[in-house]
Image (spheres, helix red, strand yellow):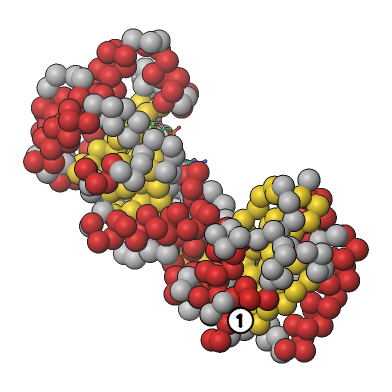
């Protein structure tokens, strides 16, 4: 099977013209033996490398290159199976990228090869050569080893008393405002006895949709009163199925009553909804969210990019916050497609005043990339796991000085 792999990386040392020529001569003989064709572009700081050849050989070369200490910040831009060779069996071709090369980048590609102007490989090369991407991406290339973890206290003023038996309860997970080095909100996540998942709690109701929605809504009174009982000093985020808002009569009033009974102000509450069902009864959803908003409650679209939540929704309805699903966050520091998507979401939300939250952040690499690209709020195990009983500390990455 044929594979094409394109990656971009940042050089960690100065390369003279002779260095690069030596490097590509070495790669040339290696590639020829393996029937791999390579194209190497270098702009003085960044490399773009195209590798085309038998899948195993390409993977082996990439594996070796990934540990080469002369470059870092390796981002895979394309990795796909191909039917035909786009390029000839050149072994290796080096292109020096300078101001003059902006025009007609691929003038050097021999005409007889299977390569069209609108081919993705050509598009990726041209984008690299134009260099606009650097404004955003180059900033993320700072070393992740510059970050230290600082512990701050969990923003619950009161410690919970001894565990009591409950048929359901809530775990709480902080959302971080990194610029201010503080927790901006705490998300309440449903748990069953022994901390079992929200899905297993809902499964008690089988297929009874009405019962699920009713429980979903009513359980929020407990989430709100618990948070207040613990002395929640930040905003509180709760999750609701869209139908728990649209199909249960008086849902807005129920939430407002729960707020009034507990003493939490509507301005402190954020309602997170996944977009899945909302789009099917859109008008009802809009009416319900308008009611919440007019009471001062903010709306977040959860799991954006997970499958349901589509861009077209934003033409009709702009939430206060948009939470980028953790599948887009996972491994973002090495994935070209994830980087392009997340960076585009940030760009489109900024002018609309929609705050972008990234969830599921587990590593400092993911965090530092998201931070550099303009994400404003962060959530994930890196900072704190959802906690049921021990609300101790929250980790905040800080740059060493
Ligand atoms: P969600 O609202 O997107 O919540 C985030 C989920 O990701 C939580 O799973 C949380 O434990 C998990 N998570 C947080 N940080 C990380 C991380 O760094 N890595 C990984 N791997 N996971 C992380 P959980 O608590 O199992 O909740 C799953 C989903 O269940 C929630 O996703 C939410 O959609 C739903 N849910 C939770 N509570 C409720 C509720 O009261 N009502 C409704 N309707 N849905 C709820
Ligand atoms: Mn959520
Ligand atoms: Mn989510």
Quarter holding the N terminus is top right
Q: In this figure, what is the number of numbered marks?
A: 1
Q: Is residue 102 above or below residue 18?
A: above
**Residue located at (44% from left, 70% from top):** 136
> Which x, y percent locates residue 328?
48, 48
Q: Is residue 63 above or below residue 233?
A: below
Left or right: where 149 falls relative to 158: right
Q: Quadrant of residue 307?
A: top left
Q: Quadrant of residue 170?
A: top left
Q: Does residue 108 appear in the picture of this structure?
A: yes
**Residue located at (39% from left, 18% from top):** 202
Mark 1 packing: few (<14 Cα in 10 Å), some, or many (20+)? many
Q: Does residue 235 appear in the picture of this structure?
A: no
For this orientation, the residue located farthest to the front is: 112
**Residue located at (36% from left, 51% from top):** 357
Residue on which the image places disc 1: 97
**Residue located at (84% from left, 72% from top):** 28
Q: Is residue 41 above or below residue 234?
A: below
Left or right: where 127 falls relative to 372: right
> Which x, y percent locates residue 108?
68, 76
């Amino acid at each position: 099977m044929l594979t094409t792999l394109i990656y971009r990386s940042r050089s960690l040392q100065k390369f003279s013209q002779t260095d690069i020529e030596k490097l590509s001569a070495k790669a040339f003989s290696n590639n020829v033996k393996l029937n791999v064709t390579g194209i190497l572009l270098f702009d003085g700081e960044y490399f773009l490398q195209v590798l085309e050849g038998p899948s195993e050989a390409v993977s082996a070369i990439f594996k070796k290159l990934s540990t080469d200490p002369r470059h870092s910040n390796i981002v895979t831009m394309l990795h796909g199976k191909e039917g035909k060779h786009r390029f000839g069996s050149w072994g290796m071709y080096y292109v020096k990228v300078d101001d003059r090369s902006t025009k007609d980048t691929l003038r050097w590609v021999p005409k007889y090869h299977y390569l069209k102007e609108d081919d993705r490989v050509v598009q990726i090369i041209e984008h690299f050569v134009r260099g606009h991407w650097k404004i955003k991406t180059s900033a993320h290339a700072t070393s992740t080893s510059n970050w230290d973890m600082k512990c701050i206290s969990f923003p619950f003023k009161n410690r919970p008393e001894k565990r009591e038996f409950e048929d359901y309860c809530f775990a709480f997970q902080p959302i971080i405002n990194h610029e201010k080095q503080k927790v901006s909100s705490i998300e309440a996540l449903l748990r069953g006895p022994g901390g079992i998942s929200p899905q297993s709690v809902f499964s008690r109701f089988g297929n009874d949709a009405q019962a699920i929605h009713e429980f979903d809504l009513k359980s929020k009174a407990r989430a709100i009163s618990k948070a207040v009982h613990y002395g929640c000093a930040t905003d509180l985020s709760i999750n609701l199925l869209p139908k728990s808002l649209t199909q249960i009569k008086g849902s807005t009033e129920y939430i407002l009553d729960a707020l009034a009974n507990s003493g939490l102000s509507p301005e402190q509450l954020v309602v997170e909804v996944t977009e899945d069902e909302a789009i099917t009864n859109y008008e009802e959803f809009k009416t319900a969210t308008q009611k919440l908003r007019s009471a001062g409650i903010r709306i977040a679209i959860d799991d954006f990019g997970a499958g349901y939540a589509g861009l077209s929704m934003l033409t009709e309805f702009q939430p206060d916050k948009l939470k980028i699903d953790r599948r887009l966050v996972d491994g973002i520091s090495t994935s070209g497609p994830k980087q392009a998507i997340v960076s585009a979401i940030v760009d489109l939300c900024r002018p609309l005043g929609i705050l972008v939250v990234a969830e599921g952040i587990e590593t400092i690499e993911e965090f530092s990339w998201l931070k550099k690209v303009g994400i404003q709020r962060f959530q994930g195990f890196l900072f704190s796991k959802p906690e049921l009983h021990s609300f101790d500390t929250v980790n905040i990455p800080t740059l060493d000085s």
